Amino acid sequence: MGRHVAASPEKSCPRHDVRLPRPLCLLAKANICGRTMRQIRGVLQPQKALALVGPSTTPLEGSASRRENASFYFSLCCWPVAYDCSVCPSQTVWCRPPRPVSQLYIHRLYRFDEVHFGKFASKYIKSQYFVDVHPPLAKLLITLAGFIFGYDGQFDFKDIAKFVVSVSLYQFKCLRSPPTERTNMYPTLRCG
Amino acid sequence: MPEITSHRTYEHVPYVAMRMIPAALGVATIPLAYLTLRALDCRAATALLASLFITFENGLVTQSRHILLDSPLIFFTALTVFLWVGFCNEDKHEPFTTSWWSWLALSGLSLGAVVSCKWVGLFTIATVGVSTLWQLWNLLGDLRITPRLFIRHFVARAICLVVVPVVFYMFMFQIHFLILENSGDGDGFMSSEFQHTLKGRGMADTFADVALGSHVTIRHVNTQGGYLHSHPHAYPTGSKRTSFSNHLICPSTKGNPMQNNKLHFIPTAI
């Protein structure tokens, strides 16, 4: 659990990192390292794939980049796998968000320059003066979205690949349990 | 099973909402590509193919999915190109109608938005500028256009494509400065006059009037350092005035001005 796919020898070819651009993956007949796309998708069940990105309490020290790669790999190759673990904090369960939205959920780690521009959103919300090379419009738009959805500006956006989302016990169990069990949990467990 | 409590630290980061802005603008670029090509008299199939290319372009898809400024930049660039193509079509048809002015003014606004996202947008301005020069050159050579009409063309473009973007750009910075009213880590880049306008920094005494006979201590704000400090040593040559030898002193005296830090303002005897 929680291991990078590429780390297990039987599941990927060491010579070919199976990161394919998405359109290539869409050509599902593609044969990657002797495995069909179907098999490769089979490797990345939602739970397994999310376990790669999986919840971690600390910033993901040594394994951060590998996990990042895994999440990237997951997003590139496995988009048809439904991702239905989005849970609204107010105990409402949103099963299966529309797929384009779920694509935005996939990367639970801040990546590359997101730490940079997310930081500016924090500073706008805390109204702390900063100096940046870029003019303000796009940063203001991003800040506006954060502001509308109740961002308080307290996250520091310091490290790339830091796990940012608070994962409740409920969400965590969702990720780690088989789908049948998961559906049973919806009415009984409270999230929060 | 990790401890759930430690996740509380990072709550309330609506990262999906924040990613939604670049994502939505990235999606909106696709119909713009279609419409632009249609406005350029391409066939529907051609325009559709182009917009499909945009839809499945990996770089754009990946870029639109993250909290980055590039997706807004590309959206506004596409919007500018679309509006400019619309304006050019209108211009060939009949100038100075309401819709002609609308296309032109919207192009200007969109240009302002491009350059307000990133300065790379200046290349978009250059593109539209070259196109404008081409139009004006053709108008200049057109003998049916009177000089008066040419000046009208020129002024209309100058207002909408220069003044409007500049005003839009400055308006964005107006909002920027209105929001950022507190002191932060960018203070050091700005002049002390500007820092004086930010809340939360002890710059209030910068412009204080000092009366004769006052005792004053002067301290470097940005580094939170020591006080301006002097010793009763004179320069070996020249005037025999007291020198300011070590201007920044050790942190042990920080917040505890000693006698040497107090500057006494006295009227000079002439």
Image (spheres, coloured by chain):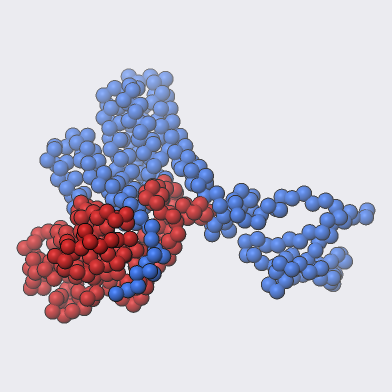
Q: The red chain is which one?
A: A
Q: Chain B is drawn in which colour?
A: blue
Residue nearest the viewer, comparing A10 with A190: A190
Q: Looking at the image, which residue is at 72% across and 71% down? A: B253
Q: Is the residue B29 above or below the residue B162 in the image?
A: below
B148 sits left or right of B82 in the view: right
Quarter-wise, where is residue B84 in the image? top left
Q: Which residue lies furthest to the right in this view?
A: B270
Q: Which residue lies furthest to the bottom in this view?
A: A9
Quarter-wise, where is residue A152 in the image? bottom left
Q: Looking at the image, which residue is at 31% across and 25% down? A: B99
| Residue A16 spot, x, y in % from top left | 17, 73
Residue nearest the viewer, comparing A119 with B41: A119
Q: Looking at the image, which residue is at 29% across and 61% down? A: A191
Q: Is the residue A34 above or below the residue B241 in the image?
A: below
| Residue A168 spot, x, y in % from top left | 31, 64
Q: Is the residue A75 above or below the residue B95 in the image?
A: below
Tag count in the figure?
A: 0
